[in-house]
Image (tube, rainbow, N blue to C red):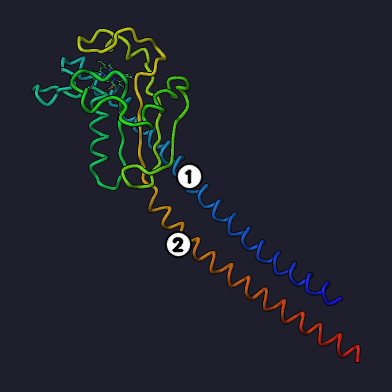
Amino acid sequence: MNIFKNRTLLLLVISIVVGLVGIFWYISRLQSTLIETMALQGTSLYCDMLQEVRSSYTSEVVVRSQARGVEVTHDYLTKEGAIPLPATFSMLLGKRVGERGDGSSTRLYSEFPFPWRKAEGGPKDDFEREALQYLKQNPTKAYYRIGTFQGRESLRYARADVMRFACIKCHNTHPSSPKTDWKVGDVRGILEVVRPLDVAFIQSKANLRETAALLGVIGISGLLLLGFTISKLKNNSETLKK
Ligand code: HEC
């Protein structure tokens, strides 16, 4: 009888502890999923916006300026009155975003950089090579990874930059073009956005510490209540026995 009682007690204690640990594990998983989902959603929107900025720049500025005889070129700084090409403009935008110093950055690269971009162009690490391979096969999808980048926990998010009808002629006839048999639908390059997540993770760790403390308090009060109830029952049954 006594052994049975002790076992019941042990089981009760174990299930309370297991239950609390389970709740903690679930909340911590929920939080990382939430951070991931939010970061992905935000970065995907940001990518859309960058692509939209370039499209609008092309249709509203480049096309209209060209019609007026303005030169559109990658080395617009050295030519009076010239304006940057859409891709050059995107790269400049990416550079400026990177210079703001919050750790986020963007990059436009491909396997076929123009001659003047040999040094900074092309995939630079495993992630960029894998993104290129994957997106060439799946141009409508996104390729991403969460990991350490330049010493910070970051989301790296890449999307294909696909050749449209408006892009083909120039890329196939430009005297410096490194490849001249582009077709509509080919993946010309990759647009990559890096977004640091360490601030979110630090915040989430602080939240988890609070959650752990709260669960600890709940667990201890539960156990105290259990002990109190059992001793009360024991007393009652002894009184009855007497
Ligand atoms: C008027 C000519 C022209 C048109 C139109 C044009 N491009 Fe380009 N593109 C260039 C030139 C020149 C460069 C090199 C720019 C530089 O390095 O600053 C370039 C660079 C790029 C790059 C970067 C390549 C690398 O590895 O550095 C990508 C990607 C790209 N273009 C995609 C496109 C897409 C997609 C379109 C259509 C939406 C398009 N381009 C339309 C001329 C053009």
Q: Amino acid at mark 2?
A: Ala
In the displayed structure, would residue 184 be above or below residue 123?
above
- Locate residue 92 relative to residue 227 in the image: left or right: left
Which residue is depicted at the point 75% across and 67% down?
11
Which residue is depicted at the point 23% across and 42% down?
99
Crowd rating for badge 1 (residues with CA inside 10 Å; few <14, some 14–19, many 20+) = some
Q: Amino acid at mark 1?
A: Glu
Residue beneath disc 2:
206
- Between 9 and 23, the residue placed more toward the observer is 9
In the displayed structure, would residue 227 be above or below residue 64?
below
Q: Position of residue 116 (x, y in %)?
A: 18, 21
Quarter of the image that includes the N terminus: bottom right
Q: Position of residue 162 (x, y in %)?
A: 39, 19
Nearer the N terminus, badge 2 or badge 1?
A: 1
Q: Which mark is residue 79?
A: none
User: From this viewpoint, which residue is outermost toward the front?
Assistant: 3
Image quadrant assignment for residue 233: bottom right
Callout 2 secondary element: helix
Q: Position of residue 119 (x, y in %)?
A: 21, 26
Residue beneath disc 1:
36
- Locate residue 5 relative to residue 95 in the image: left or right: right
